[in-house]
Amino acid sequence: MDKAVEVHPDDRPYAWAEVDLGAIEHNASLLAERARPAQLCAVVKGWAYGHGTIRAATAAVAGGATWLGVALVNEATDVRVRGQLSEPILILAEPPHRQLGDVARLDGVRVTLYTAEGIRAAAKAAREVGRDTPLPVHLKVDTGMHRVGAAPQSALHLAELVTASEGLELEGLWTHLAASEDPAHDDYTARQLQCFDAVRERLAAAGIRPPIVHAANSGAVLAHPEARYDLVRCGIALYGIPPRPRMPEAAGLRPAMALKARVSYVKRVAAGEPISYGLHHVCEQPTVVATVPIGYYDGVPRQLGLVGGEVLVRGVRRRVVGAVTMDQLMVDCDSDESVHIRDEVVLFGSQGGETISAWEWAERLDTIAYEIVCRVAINRVPRRYLPA
Ligand SMILES: *Cc1c(COP(=O)(O)O)cnc(C)c1O
């Protein structure tokens, strides 16, 4: 049969992301063990790095996470109200002040603050909501990430402001490390931790000892035991992805997400013919080319086909050729006549004995694996959950 006349299969979806909840549970228990006696906070911001907030949070809790971390107030609401999870939830950045009423109404939510205006607004919101208990506040200090957080020299003043505010309780003190996964920056990590310890001591000298001190992200949990304090905040490692490629300390983590699709079209292309927009790739010999119905609108970067990116078909690595288009990409199957429409394509994940990691894509594309999993489009690529 001439493959060129095969038509698109009508079994949907054509592309999906498989999420292994057992892997998340396993990673959580490995990280909880590594963090002990510190508690594990599972970071589920950004729709759990593309894995699905509630499913991922539930699996993490089953594995031993006792806290959940989010970036936004609506994510906290999602976990608490829709997800019905009862663990303490930490919002990792100072929310817009008009949302502090919602924060104060949510049971068990802890808010990060680092401005005097934020502290006053939170105290006012907590009083107006009429809580039975004070709203727990985690004061964030910027020790060198320079994203958000109070300057170290303002920390004592802000801590005193919280403790003096009716309606608030200073439960936590924390900072965020900028390069904890990279041994080339161990000096910088040490400087950040020294600065953090100095802030802690200054507060202690004034009689302020927040019970929950935290600094570690995945990189620090794995590589800087001294940064564990009372709580560690793990995102990427929870999803089975090391914070940097080939990190020996990350051995044992299992990647939770695989990106898959089915071949939608197969044809033979003559030697000398180009593939895709811009004619960037030219077939050197007669080639079997498979088309896969996933593209940059779904989260596969256009560049992947121009930088040597590979996918798995029939357990074999094959090159993506030519520019990835909005919703389709082409794969060089050499002279393999066994490739057929509907064959499963693994974009990242495992097939046969082969594995393509999110880091492999990231390194080709000069980015990090975090971005690869987060960009798999939520509105386009359904998640299929493998139960724990
Ligand atoms: C995202 C985030 C984390 C988790 O970082 P990973 O490197 O994914 O472990 C921890 N803390 C804060 C403040 C974050 O924003």
Image (cartoon, helix red, strand yellow):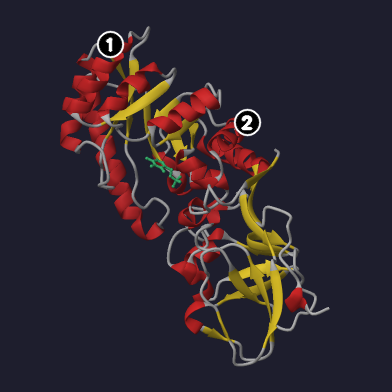
User: Residue type at mark 2?
Assistant: Ala
- Which label lies toward us, 2 or 1? 1
Which of the two residues, 171 or 102, is positioned nearer the viewer here?
102
As drawn, 142 above or below 324: above
The residue wearing badge 2 is 62
Q: Distance between the residues labelled 2 and 1?
A: 35 Å
Residue 275 in the image, given as x and y percentages of width and height: 57, 81
Q: Is mark 1 on a helix, strand or loop?
A: helix
Which of the two residues, 275 or 386, is positioned nearer the viewer here?
275
As drawn, 83 above or below 373: above
Query: Which residue: 69% across, 89% down?
Result: 286
Residue 194 in sight in this render: yes
The residue wearing badge 1 is 127
As drawn, 195 above or below 272: above
Query: Which residue: 59% across, 61% down?
Result: 357
Which of the two residues, 348 or 156, is positioned nearer the viewer here?
348
33 displayed left or right of 209: right
Question: Which quadrant is the N terminus positioned in?
Answer: bottom right
As drawn, 140 above or below 260: above
Query: Which residue: 79% across, 80% down?
Result: 2
Residue 318 in the image, given as x and y percentages of width and height: 65, 74
User: Residue type at mark 1?
Assistant: Arg
Q: Earlier in the sequence, mark 2 or mark 1?
A: 2
Q: In which quarter of the image is residue 109?
A: top left
Residue 230 in sight in this render: no
Q: In which quarter of the image is ligand 1?
A: top left
Query: Which residue: 44% across, 38% down?
Result: 233
